Amino acid sequence: MTNTLYDSLFAQHEGNEAPFLQLDDGRVVSYDAFHRRAAQIAHVLKKSGVSPGDRIVVQAPKLADTIALYAASVQAGAVYMPLNTAYTLAELDYFISDAQPALIVCDTKDKAELEQLAARCGANLLTLGGEDSSLSHAADEQPCVFETLDRGAEDLAALLYTSGTTGRSKGAMLSHRNLLSNAQTLVDLWGITNVDRLVHALPIFHTHGLFVAMNTSLLAGAKVRLMERFDVGVILDELPRSTLLMGVPTFYTRLLADEGFTNEVTGNMRLFISGSAPLLAETHVAFEARTGHRILERYGMTETNMNTSNPYSGERRAGTVGMALPGTEVIVTNPETGESLPQGEVGMIEVRGPNVFKGYWRMPEKTAEELRENEFFITGDLGRYSEDGYLSIVGRSKDLIITGGYNVYPKEIEDILNDFNGVLESAVFGVPDSDFGEAIIAVLVADPGAQLDMKKLAETVKDKLSRFKHPRSYEIVSGLPRNTMGKVQKNVLRDQYSQKELQVGVL
Ligand code: MLC
Ligand code: AMP
């Protein structure tokens, strides 16, 4: 039996007594114990009716068993589908109806809420976390060996939803090859080995925390200090005995804001990596001045895993995302014609390689729009190459806000605002924010003579959308700025509200 991803990431750890996960409560899970736990969970998956190719939806806390569930899903030939723990029931409804999973694994505390949803789509439901974790209890009773199911390089290993400009999220289908090839490339490029100890403070439901951080550690046999949540104090305690940190820019600005973050604390560290959102050049410079370390910035996406990285050994240049990863082509094109542009010109970033996904789940038209016949993926990011081959991301052609490393598509919020009683139209956009990079602002135009019930409007948004998508401020205006084509000029709004002292938390 062969299973592309399982064989490389997990099977090699049978009998490996070295520490793998080091948890908040001090417990340590060895690689071998992890390997056995994954097998126990794989038995539970099989008993719960999961067959190869079935989706397993996971909205669960960040625990050792959650990582083992990911391994078990791969071993059982299933498709792992992690979801942001912030998603509301309304958001979950869409993902679950769209993906039609055989099994849903939720946080034990959310069981009652999820039961109905699971029943409606004919999925089994198990829970993780706390004393009553049904998945963990069921796994305790199972054998520690599981016969790995056959999966080839092109079979799906994961389905990750990413929101879209139309407001409808799309499931990016990621194959065993996509995930394994990217992990191998990153391990080589960043020199990750079993001597490394990674401080893992990212969520494990996105590409960054799950694949970039966890797959590379598993491949290299590194130790992982698994923090259930981001906490500056804990990171400061852990850095002196660690070698690696991967984070979104907010991690680095928050660390810099703490006086305890010094070059002594970072003395044992080998590498700081940033991605998922633009790292300001000034953060890069301040970081080096404080610690002597130059942050390595890289660029990726849910659909493509990682595309580019600053060099490990060469110059790590502030404000750039480096060069294409070995084996991956990253070009800048004329958005109209798709033709490659010379260095120095700004155009659409397109990516081709073994890292690029297989298309959107049950959305052939969307896939065709973004994945060219020549297999280049159109990222929606605008970039420019320097003469010596460093790529800078200079903007986005997609209407997207990135807040603290989470993507938010304005359309999804505008649709909800526009449906609200008394709202004629709305525009949602991001303004610079020192903590999250961008903060969300909504401007509203009321129907003639209408009085908007702002409290109710905020409650409606709260019911429907995750906390990180809530506008920080709502502004009522008499009209939206438009160009001659009638299109709302978000850049004008962005400029206007970036300067204005915002009344934060008006509701
Ligand atoms: C939390 N809040 C956010 C937020 N995170 N609001 C906007 N944007 C965010 N990202 C809310 C909280 O719910 C809280 O609301 C308030 O803001 C203050 O929260 P906090 O305690 O300060 O936030 P914290 O829990 O510390 O989280 C911040 C964070 C987290 C930066 C640690 O957002 C995070 O882990 N981000 C990483 C996202 C990520 O992994 N992206 C990778 C995507 S993959 P209230 O109401 O309670 O006050 C990808 C590909 C690639 O992009 O290239 O990697
Ligand atoms: P996601 O869909 O969550 O995977 O987010 C991918 C998007 O994050 C990319 O299309 C970019 O817009 C953005 N992104 C990722 N890494 C970087 C980076 N280093 N600098 C700027 N933007 C980035």
Image: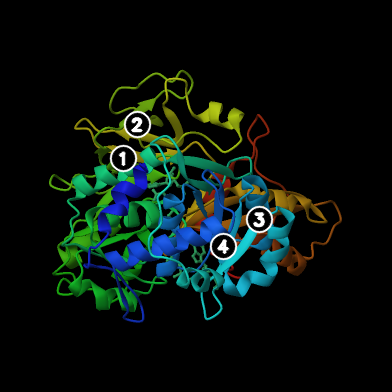
**Callouts 1 and 3 close, C-beta under 8 Å:** no
**Residue at the spot x=54%, y=31% of the render?**
367
Pointer 3: residues within 10 angstroms few (<14), some, or many (20+)? many
User: Label 4 sits on what residue type?
Assistant: Val
Q: CA distance from mark 3 to mark 4?
A: 10 Å
Q: CA distance from mark 2 to mark 3?
A: 35 Å
Q: Dot 2 corresponds to which residue?
A: 353
User: Label 1 sits on what residue type?
Assistant: Ser
The nearer-to-camera label among 2 and 3 is: 3
Circle on res. 105: 4
Pointer 4: residues within 10 angstroms few (<14), some, or many (20+)? many
Among the two numbered marks 1 and 3 on one chain, the one whose residue lies closer to the N terminus: 3
Circle on res. 123: 3
Q: Is residue 405 visible?
A: no
**Callouts 2 and 4 close, C-beta under 8 Å:** no
Indicate if the residue with disc 3 has its beta carbon within 8 Å of ligand 2: no
The nearer-to-camera label among 1 and 3 is: 3
Q: Secondary structure at mark 1?
A: helix
Q: CA distance from mark 2 to mark 1?
A: 9 Å
**Residue at the spot x=23%, y=45% of the render?**
310
**Callouts 4 and 1 close, C-beta under 8 Å:** no
Q: Secondary structure at mark 3?
A: loop
User: Label 3 sits on what residue type?
Assistant: Ala
Q: Dot 1 corresponds to which residue?
A: 181
Q: Residue furthest right?
A: 449
